[in-house]
Amino acid sequence: MATQTRLFLCRHASPDNPGGVFYGHLDGFGLGSAGIAEAHGLGQMLAPEPIRVIYTSPLQRARETAEIVARHLSPGLPLGVRPDLVETRFGLYIQGIRRPEVLWRRPLFFVHYLAPGLLPADEPVGVLAARVGRACAEALAACRGEAAALVSHADPIKAFWNAHLGRPEWRFHQLRVDKGCCLELTYVDDHLDGVTYHPPRRADGDSNVIVPV
């Protein structure tokens, strides 16, 4: 008989970022008040699920999101750091730069957007998807027949989703993955059978974004 397992692949909630910079791999970008509310909303959504493990990117904003989510789940639930869930390597090139200035201070951003993975400083979309897939495979083995949560970043999540959809790699930027959202991955045995997008919710349970199409 086939076994169904669900993984919840989440993007970290909103960091405190008053300077409006690309935070990349930098420390010092913990959750702001909106992000804390989003993380609690995510925890409320996942509370009824039979979550057995939580894996998170090592970066601060992801760890804080995972820690808040864990408070809503079973006491003593294992929370493991997984480097495979970390932000894309291209984030190292643009981190610390204010968003309005990125095109003239980091002009290779334009190349990254049009041809992701082409530059030596970039990370191929397929590589991003594969490393998220490794973390998902580990979670699947750890919670077979139940559920797990994983907290990562926009580009790795979009790359994984894009690969599942079978779309050309350059289209992965077109997927919308908002801060505090999650993808519900439904596996039948070891096969990823479906993906459902859940938009961010604040702690009061109200949706605060439009679901992408």
Image (cartoon, rainbow, N blue to C red):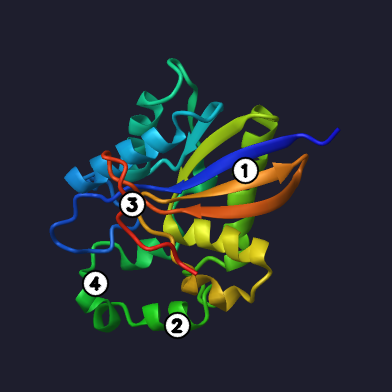
Circles 4 and 1: CB distance less than 8 Å?
A: no
Q: Where, by quadrant of the figure, is residue 3 drawn?
A: top right
Residues 153 and 111: in front is: 153
* Distance between mark 3 and mark 1 Cα atoms: 26 Å
Q: Is residue 113 above or below residue 32?
A: below
**Secondary structure found at label 3:** loop
Give the class, few, some or many, for how many residues have Cα within 10 Å of label 4's Cα (few <14, many ≥20): some
Amino acid type, mark 4: Arg
Kind of element beneath mark 4:
helix
Q: Residue at x 48, y 72 (%)?
A: 173
Placement of 44 over or under 198, stated as above or below: above
Residue on which the image places disc 2 = 111
Q: What's the distance in space between the residues labelled 1 and 2, CA to CA?
A: 29 Å
Which residue does the numbered mark 4 point to in the structure image? 99
Amino acid type, residue under disc 3 in the picture: Ser
Badge 1: residue crowd in 10 Å (few <14, some 14–19, many ≥20): many
State the quadrant of the N terminus. Answer: top right
**Residue 192 drawn at (x, y percent):** 71, 50
Q: Nearer the viewer, mark 4 or mark 2?
A: 4
Report the Cα–Cα distance between label 4 and label 2: 16 Å
Position of 62 with respect to 112 (left or right) is left
The crowding category of the residue bearing disc 3, from other C-alpha atoms within 10 Å (few below 14, some 14 to 19, many at least 20), is some
Residue 104 percent across, percent down from the top left: 25, 84
Residue under numbered circle 1: 136
Q: Earlier in the sequence, mark 3 or mark 1?
A: 1
